[in-house]
Amino acid sequence: MSGGEGGGGAGRVGSAGRVGSAGSVGGEGSVGRAGSVGILIVSTRAAAGTYDDRTGPLIEAWATARGWSVANRLVVPDGPGVGPAIAELLRAAPDLVVTSGGTGIHPHDRTPDQTRPLLDYEIPGFPEELRRRGGQKVASALLSRGLAGVAGSSIVVNLPGSTGGVRDGLGLLDDVLDHMVDQLHGGDHRRTD
């Protein structure tokens, strides 16, 4: 959730390097096809520099462990700047855009509201499963309003602002991301019989 009012636009964050391993986030065998990811951290406190961004490095380490490149990583305060920051990331046409933060019910949590107009269509099963998995650990995970969907040739996923919620989301991405990207680019369904 947001930590109060803050100003300013998107802040760029340089490479954070490896902060973990695939095993600490998504488990063994989670490396699939190489791709690119844009990362947006939505936190009024992190954007103001009064709070360290702890989820951006997790997402970046996960992407790097998968062999993916990080197209860009931005930090913005909660509020109306979220939509333009997502649009900025989408202009680079990454395979995936991951946001973290601003998905709750706090008055300033507007990430899903800023994401929805940018999507061509939603993928409702992803956030439903993320809430289900998170709710088994902590009931407040059920309050997340995060979305997932497709914008052009990019998959967009809103994750919570907590490190636990991000780990859950990255674990779920490990389960489905390769298939999602393959399908988005016209691939055939894998046969399981």
Image (cartoon, grey):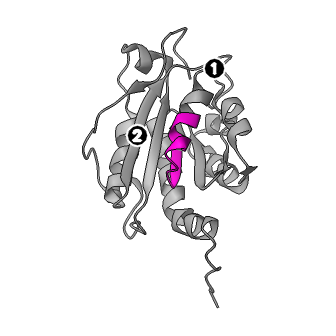
Element assignment for label 1 = loop
Q: Give the answer, above or below, for where 135 lies relative to 113.
A: below
Number of labels in the image equals 2
Q: Position of residue 164 (x, y in %)?
A: 47, 41
Q: Which residues are magenta?
A: 87-97
Q: Which residue is mark 2?
A: 72
Mark number displayed over residue 80: 1
Q: Amino acid at mark 2?
A: Asn
Residue 28 is inside the magenta segment: no
Q: Amino acid at mark 1?
A: Pro
Q: Position of residue 47 (x, y in %)?
A: 43, 19
Element assignment for label 2 = strand
Q: Is residue 73 left or right of residue 126?
A: left
View extreme (front): residue: 91
Q: Is residue 61 left or right of residue 158?
A: left
Q: Position of residue 120 (x, y in %)?
A: 73, 49
Q: Give the answer, above or below, for where 53 lies relative to 92.
A: above
Q: Is residue 55 visible?
A: no
Q: Residue 103 lies in what quarter of the image? A: top right
